[in-house]
Image: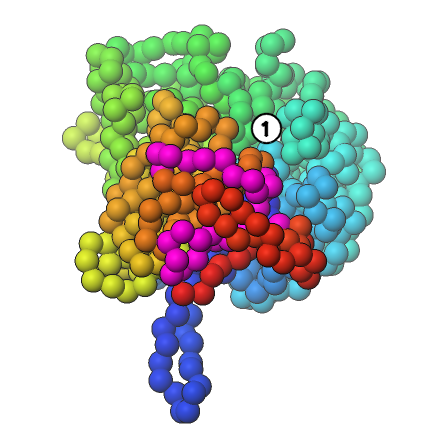
Amino acid sequence: MIQSLVKTVFFLKFVLFYVMVTGGEGNAETFTWKNVKIGGGGGFIPNVIYNTTQPGLVYARTDMGGLYRRDSISGKWLPLTDWVAPEDWNLLGGEAFATDPVDPKICYFAAGTYTNDWTDMNGKMLRSKDYGDTWEAFDMTFKFGGNMPGRGMGERLAIDPNSHNILYFGARSGNGLWKSDNFGETWAKVSSFPVTGDYVQDPLLPYTADPIGVVWISFDKSSSESGKATSRIFVGVAQKSGPTVYQSNDAGATWSAIEGQPLGPDTAHIMPHHGVIRDSVLYIPYCNKGGPYDGNYGEIWKYNFYTKTWTDITPHSHLIDEAWGTETLQKDDAYYGYGGFDVDYQNPNIIIAATLNSWWPDAVLFKSVDGGATWTKSFYWTSYPSAKFKYEIETTYPWLNWGTTSTRWPDVVQPKLGWMISGIALNPFNSNEFMYGTGATIYGTKNFGDWGDPDKKVLIKSVADGIEECAVLSLAVPPITSGVGTNVKLLSGVGDIGGFAHTDLQTPTQMFLTPAFGNTHSIDYAELDPKQVVRVGVAAPVQYETPCNIANSTDGGLSWNKVYASLDTTYKSGTVAMSAKGSSILWAAEGKVPYCGSFYGLKITNLPADVWVASDRVDDSVFYAFKDSIFYKGNESVFTKTSTGLPFSSSKIKAVP
């Protein structure tokens, strides 16, 4: 989710609610609020972070939906940032998170969504002493970027495991490396750190022009005794060129680039996405871009800091493919970078890695049982397009298959393993378990050990119950009548995954399909015939060759039809209204002069572009519009101004039945 959702993201935290009205004394009504259950998460989860000393303690960092902690008994994720007020929406962006290895009750959340001019709010460092149930906030002097490029790299925030009053934070925007020695209350820039991380995704766009910065910090706990500051520290940075991994041997007083470190080929300078330390070895997955969307080259290396040797353990260069025996590919044969990565705490020979951005045919997971010398992958081709899989996916959230088994690509499996896999985490106390975030959910397994068994498959499930990260863009509640489609209690338009016709407010359902939208910006129904529904938004191009940004339903939103009116595909989003009986619509597409009429006879109106529109809920021929303090009334032939100089320059409008 990026700029299209900036103005609506702060509604996410309050997501979709419904009201149960119970009787009270006199005219009083008591409202009981509950979440409408979409399920599955609904947005990007950059990382899953386990506490390494308390079993069962694990957190999920989202990019713009706050922080969650998983209940170890129920498995449900509990929101920890729902206290954030709408005016402080920027704090819902998760730049980084750290859970204290010395006192597990303590955790920190670097809260801030954007570093560009989409907000004027600086980041805040949040500290909790009760597992995230309550927080203290400490002001920082610069912005954080939880929803900016490179948000899956990390973690940028790290606690010294030997002296847990000490924290380090890697900043964006050229602000460098920062340190706190009083449990995060005050911070000072580490002036001796030599670089700031100057890589930018695209200097020409406001969203991508900010330097990604210092991206992770890792401590070698064995280099110092408990109670003293850890002496050996490693830091990864997103640099355009030159070294990207730095080391201190004197508790951060001085720093130097590690000699002999990989830089990638001349055509693809690589950047370190994570730094994982196990048994005197630093493991680093690399990608030539910051992600989470981009990147087409990667490597994985390990560095033994006692012998000072680097070893290339890139999976696609060391594959053992069951179809053809040992397979050695050239590094430039891979079309992806590496993101999610972890090493088993109990047996460091076991490693898991994930492609960051293998969009077709699916993401790929890799496993090594010999410290990276050889790897196997989650699926392999037998005779294209046929493949065999080491896993199966089970999900209780129907929308995760995007309503298709894919007629466009017969070799794409649904639901997919994921995309944008930036963070993957093995359970420190159970080597059979791992979880990883995708652009839509959290997946996990409890039988990772069965990976190598030819008679078994790793069962992967969506384990995101409790996380609701959808940005709500539009809502409609059709009246209760008799007939087709009357079991629809709520119509929701959301960001990234389109929207839903909710027949049961506590049971996840399939998304809007045919066409599938990425975002549904507006939805309306015919007041006198509520089985007639219209929605507009932005089509999901991966699903359909020809984008279609408007759809109608004749069964209350349970099924849909593409509307191919005489409009080009630049007509998208905006607001839409359906007449009282459903005979016509008024569509004010984004940046376009509105159209009005039947679905297949839309005519241009005399209204200005970007008006808010609504229909009369009784008269089938009447529509309304509002913009620049002017109110309009009309029909598909002509609109006239009925009021001017109104107190609001622009506002959503709706007629009362």
Where 542 sits versus 507, above or below? above
Residue at far left of view:
455
**Going 44% across and 10% down the picture, which residue do you hit?**
333
Residue 587 falls left or right of residue 177: left
Where 551 sits versus 297, above or below? below
Q: Position of residue 198 (x, y in %)?
A: 73, 27
Among the 4 quarters of the image, the one containing residue 651 = bottom right
* Residue annotated with mark 1: 290
Q: Nearer the viewer, residue 381 or 602?
A: 602
Q: Quadrant of the C terminus?
A: bottom left
Numbered circles on residues, count: 1
Instruction: Tell me if residue 607 is in the magenta stretch.
Output: yes
Q: Nearer the viewer, residue 523 or 259?
A: 523
Q: Amino acid at mark 1?
A: Gly
**Going 61% across and 60% down the picture, which residue do you hit?**
86
Dot 1: element: loop
Instruction: Tell me which segment is drawn in magenta.
Output: 599-627
Residue at far right of view:
191
Instruction: Tell me if residue 501 is in the magenta stretch.
Output: no
Residue 120 falls left or right of residue 498: right
